[in-house]
Amino acid sequence: MDQLLINPDYPYILSTLIFLPLAGALLLLFIKNEDFARYWALGITTLTAILSIPLVVAFDTSTSQYQFVEQVSWVKSLNIQYVIGIDGISILLVMLTTFIMPLCVLASWTYIKTRVQAFMICLLIMETAMLGVFMALDFVLFYILWEAMLIPMYLLIGIWGGPRRIYASIKFFLYTLSGSVMLLVAIIWLYVQNGYSFFIPDMMWQNYSSTAQILLFLAFFLAFAIKVPMFPFHTWLPAAHVEAPTAGSVILASVLLKMGTYGFLRFAIPITPEATMILGPAILWLSIAGIIYGGFTALAQHDMKKLIAYSSVGHMGFVTLGIFVLNTAGVEGAILQMLNHGITTGALFLCIGMIYERTHSRELSSATGVGKHMPIFVTFLAFFSLSSFGFPATNSFVGEFLILAGTFEYSIPLALAAIPGAVLAAAYMLRMLQKIVWGGTDNPDQSWINDLNLREIVTLSPFLFFVFWIGLGAQPFIDLIHVSVANLLDNYHAFHGQAVAVADIILH
Amino acid sequence: MQFLPELTLLGAGLIIFIVSLGKTNADTTRNVAIGLGAAVFVATLLSFSQTGKLFFDAYQVDLYSQVFKTLIAGAMLIVLLLGKDLKGIDNSVRPEYYLFLFISVLGLMMLVSSVELLSIFVALELSSFAVYIMVPMRSDKGNQRFQMEAGIKYLLFGVTATGFMLFGMSYMYGLTGSTQLSVIVEKLSLMYSQPAAVVAMMMVLAGFFYKLAIFPFHFWVPDVYEGASNETTAFIASVPKLAAVALLIRLVSLINGEGQVIVNVLMVCAVLSMFYGNLSALVQKDIKRMLGFSGIAHAGFVLLGILTFQITGYANALYYIIGYVVMNLACFLVVCTVSQKGENVMIEDLSGLHKRSPFMAFTLAVGLFALAGIPPFVGFMGKFMLLTSALKEGYLLLVILAALNTAIAIFYYLSVVRVTFCNDPEERADVSSSLLTNAASVFLLLVIVIMGVTPQRFVDFASSAVQTIM
């Protein structure tokens, strides 16, 4: 068990983070008061966020081991363990989740008017499941939380969503569930191969046969690519994003999509390195397709939420591009970009939600020219838009820059193919920004619109803070992930080298 | 003491018979029946740790049989509670309905203890004939009479399956010269290369395939589920399946993995059940029919554990069928409550249930998600363990096909959840559920979650129960 590091100062910190929201949700079951539900959910999520701060403080950046580990046997006869821990790959995602949840509660304060308790229960259960997915080191534990998450998310979209919510929620559920069915078979196969153990670190860097690796990789790919979503598996995303309530969209964009890319890093590359080598190039070109496709489609949207949704397809394309070029700059950029996309796109969805609360329309044409009446709002929006297309000094610039640097190192034609995506991003974001701030001569009458209130400013400010912090001083964040990424890539290249050596022997 | 549960049931039947002679109002009959059901449950608990043999070794009381008896009694009690208003049965025949219910359960309890071919046959018939009568007892308010059709179908298919089974038993007797299962094991294990032995085994299994509704003995399911009253369907869909699995495991453990032919046949049956059940369920409009088809698919899953011929596989099958009964009862509880006058419930009728009765909608959602195999509910754990035990034996293709079926199944379960949560109730009336029903549903929900989150204890227990018959 040399991969695990138990941190004696904080023995149960991860479990506390996982179960605190669940306990809060259980208590809410018995409460009938709506205002209490709001304050309670805010309190619980804030407490979780505060409790997660020691993770960063006490995180040992000099080791690639899993830290803050807790290990309890769960189902003995099948050797399923409750084992959780975090490393450089997951820590930023855990922090992102804990910090974004209180803001989601704030964003739903007045947006959700019916059945507030049930809504808050769903949010809290989501938080438990999402944190668990990023921390789980046992494959069954991971799979259970990965699937369990679908139910509250389905209800969030299906009950509190927009007009086409039924279609969107069913599509979301079916897509994600059917994608992960083969993942289950892969898990059981790995269990049988690895001496009846579901412990994830033990499954990595094993010599499975090439055929098995390719099949495993395809099972992983189907599950994770749908979640990312990679082109051409992205069609559930615009529907789900558009119909979900604001908090739902933010959770989807900021956290759920990251699970796909996290899955690639945690499972696909270490467990099936040989298949990664063989199939990686195809995924790179799929990423390029996603970047270009997302960009062009976003350019044509009249629905603001759809626009952001398609921009997500493009941004996540950058992330998968960074992951599969498999060099330090690329992978570090990809992880950083996962965080950045969570911050920026989450904030953009919040902004759109704030307009929607006022005009009850997601149409771009009904929101033209609100800048005149909502100066504070458009200030926020402008910064987030700039961040979205990777303007220097904002967070996405650092991430995209690293990814493109890594891609250049890998292959110049590939990098050149990705560049238009960055240009397209600027085009569609600026188009939206221009319309919302100034519009044209045919602006609808917006004089009755109020600017942001204090609650909304409080909701958006943390996002802005992180946009600039990462944009101007990304080093602390990169330090957190560096050792784990280096370890991942070292192992991968060692494996790669071995495979090449074997191939040489066979060939000569 | 060893025979206490059966005697209590017999006594319960007699008391109900006496009640049926006079004119009693519906409430008294119901209360008496629920009280007797509880008494039977207590009796099974009292005799839980008994072991021994009765009736010239034809009847074996061991941990395995007592576990099943307790489960059967518990499931019966829940069926009595959820159908306590007995909306679908005419007031005049209610005492008789309870009488046949008890007799049927008596047959099932005897079945799980039987270790001799003839007593197996007698017990099976006792339970079947009582149910054959319960199906057409539904009141025909709409004068549709489809319960008669259902009754006749159930009877004819049942008799055919029994015929197969008897024929198979005669082969077994001819081959081994005994009707004792313990003797048959020894002698038959030397003969699995012979077609006669395989045919004998398959034919005997057919009788239980019929009870469990496994392809190709599933044809009665949709019509009987639809035609029988909601309460009867809840009973048919749960309690006999427990006993069928009990006997199936007893019989299959005779094979000891020697008969590769039988394994192959079981595999084909399992896969076809899953695909047939799930694909047909996709297009159903009546929720009972849908649950019926889903039951066929789940029976296929149970076979997955049985065909491994390992103790863990049997234990997983046992765990799964218990979970299935609990999930299924949770769904039927909602169906019985939503049905106003005992009429069938269309999926559309559940529209906006979350506004008409939030708790019932919640129960239904948990029940359906559990059936679909979504964690953290028992359905997921059960499926997961069955797939694991099948893959341990190297049946990769089978596992992949089963996993595909999970993906198909999710669609129809989800459609029902969608209707309950996302549709408007329109003009539909509110649904009220009594305190007792709510208590039953809380109990079922707790079992669904607890079994799903801490499966260890249950599986260990199932293994030790299975161990006693090996």
Image (tube, helix red, strand yellow):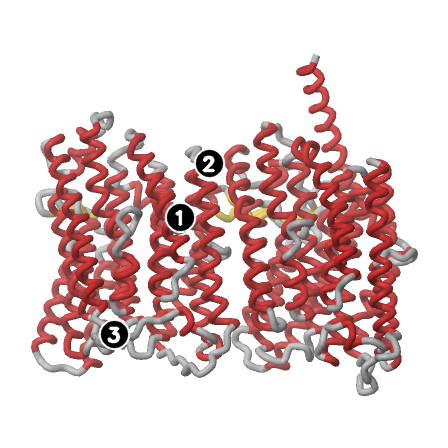
Residue at mark 1: B275
Q: Identify which residue is drawn at 51% across, 48% down.
A: A74
Left or right of residue B288: residue A457: right
Q: CA distance from mark 3 to mark 1?
A: 32 Å
Left or right of residue B334: residue B134: left
Nearer to us: label 3 or label 1:
1
Q: CA distance from mark 3 to mark 2?
A: 46 Å
Q: Position of residue A431 (x, y in %)?
A: 85, 65
Q: Quadrant of the N terminus of chain B?
A: bottom left
For the residue marked with disc 1, what is the amino acid?
A: Phe
Residue at mark 2: B396
Chain letter of the residue beneath label 3 in the structure image? B
Residue farthest to the bottom, as pictured:
A448
Nearer to us: label 1 or label 2:
1
- Element at label 2: helix
Residue at mark 3: B88
Q: Position of residue A442 (x, y in %)?
A: 84, 79
For the residue marked with disc 3, what is the amino acid?
A: Gly
Residue A484: name its quadrant: top right
Q: Is residue A264 above or below residue B379?
A: above
